[in-house]
Amino acid sequence: MNILAVESSCDETAVAIVRDGRQVLTDCIASQVELHRIYGGVVPEIASRMHIEAIYGLADQALREANLTRGDIDAVAVTYAPGLIGAVLVGVNFAKAAALALQKPLIPVHHIRGHIAANYLAYPELEPPFLCLVVSGGHTMIVDVKSYTEMEILGTTLDDAAGECFDKVGRVLGMPYPGGAALDKAAQQGDDQKYPLPRSRPGANPYDMSFSGLKTAALNLIHHAEQVGEELNIPDLCASFTAAVSDTLVPRVEQALKQTGRKRLAAAGGVAANSRIRKDILDMAQGMGVEVYLPPLKLCGDNAAMIGAQGYYEYLSGNTGDMTLNAYATKSILGEAL
Ligand code: KG4
Ligand code: ZN
């Protein structure tokens, strides 16, 4: 089954063609990052306008690259939530038009379910059940993936997402948007013990997390140094900050693995590209008899192939949409309104 998959929830317009949920025939991405960089973050209206200009040509490009014609497409999958609403609407409307024109099923896919499914593309042997650490620009949670379409959220951030914090701290340090990758690079040369930063334990659920205290502490430290004219060691600060993020994530995942008895662990989302977090996950799982699946860096960030992968399993579960499909800025991974 060839699925034409569309992703437009943030600042990448992406169209992919994925066969049977596992084989990427083509994965086309038009990134807008350079455009938004001058503003230090995504400008929603610019994102929507760029999606609308890019999406049709990208779909044609995907067909050409896969050496397919429109008649070879069996279904159209699309990110319908969550994201910048104007941006998601462009993809949803395009996918509806494509499904109608092709007379093929329309499959709504939750963006975060897509991130999790990126692992199916990289690891043909991976099947649920498994635990997944989801760490993206807008989400941070530990998910029990019970089947391809049944999931339970064991814990979540109660405030900021990990990626948001990377981007904010990176911005204040003068790094280009999005700050996560640059901060990761700087941290690799740094001493993670140099600057003490907090690891908070919010609420009663041991799997819930909080990053706003850490973000504020890092920003205060930077602003204070500026005020008193103290020169900060940037690599040390980046390493100390990244260690605090990782210490917030990884021990909770370890506890969740122990409690659930799951023997497979995956990671998903842009922040899953972080070298320190990847290393800490591998170190933690070693000796626990847990198989670790870390998506290749290319599949950590936003792409449409992951939407095609999850779309296939949503289709098999009967989760298709129709011409009344709407787009949502927020929606739980379980499909509930937030
Ligand atoms: O999953 P994603 O591409 O988009 C969302 O769905 O949000 O994640 C983007 C986030 C950004 O915050 C970006 O700074 C972060 O992923 N990121 C990283 C790294 N690469 C991307 N954060 C830390 N270390 C990295 N190497
Ligand atoms: Zn994403």
Image: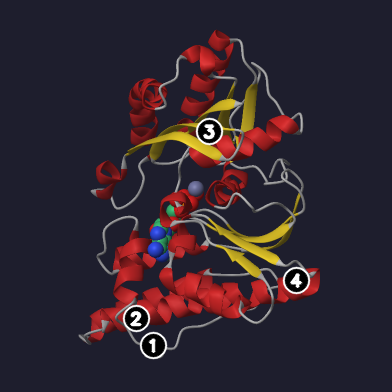
Q: Position of residue 243 (x, y in %)?
A: 46, 79
Check disc 3: other Cα within 10 Å, few if <14, some if 14-19, many if 20+. many
- Labels 3 and 2 touching (C-beta < 8 A): no
The disc placed on residue 237 is 2
Measured Cα–Cα span from mark 1 to mark 2: 6 Å
Disc 1, SS: loop
Q: Earlier in the sequence, mark 3 or mark 2?
A: 3
Q: Nearer the viewer, mark 3 or mark 2?
A: 3
- Labels 1 and 2 touching (C-beta < 8 A): yes
The amino acid at mark 3 is Val
Quadrant location, the C terminus: top right
Q: Please say if 326 is above or below 148.
A: above
The answer to whether residue 251 is seen in the rendering is: yes
Residue at image coords 49%, 79%:
244
Q: Nearer the viewer, mark 3 or mark 1?
A: 3
The disc placed on residue 205 is 4
Quadrant location, the N terminus: top right
Disc 3, SS: strand
Measured Cα–Cα span from mark 4 to mark 2: 29 Å
The amino acid at mark 1 is Tyr
Q: Earlier in the sequence, mark 1 or mark 2?
A: 1
Residue at image coords 42%, 27%:
66
Residue hosting label 1? 195
> Between residues 4 and 93, which one lies in front from this camera angle?
4
The amino acid at mark 2 is Leu
Q: Quadrant of residue 178?
A: bottom left
Q: Is residue 246 left or right of residue 126?
A: left
Disc 4, SS: loop
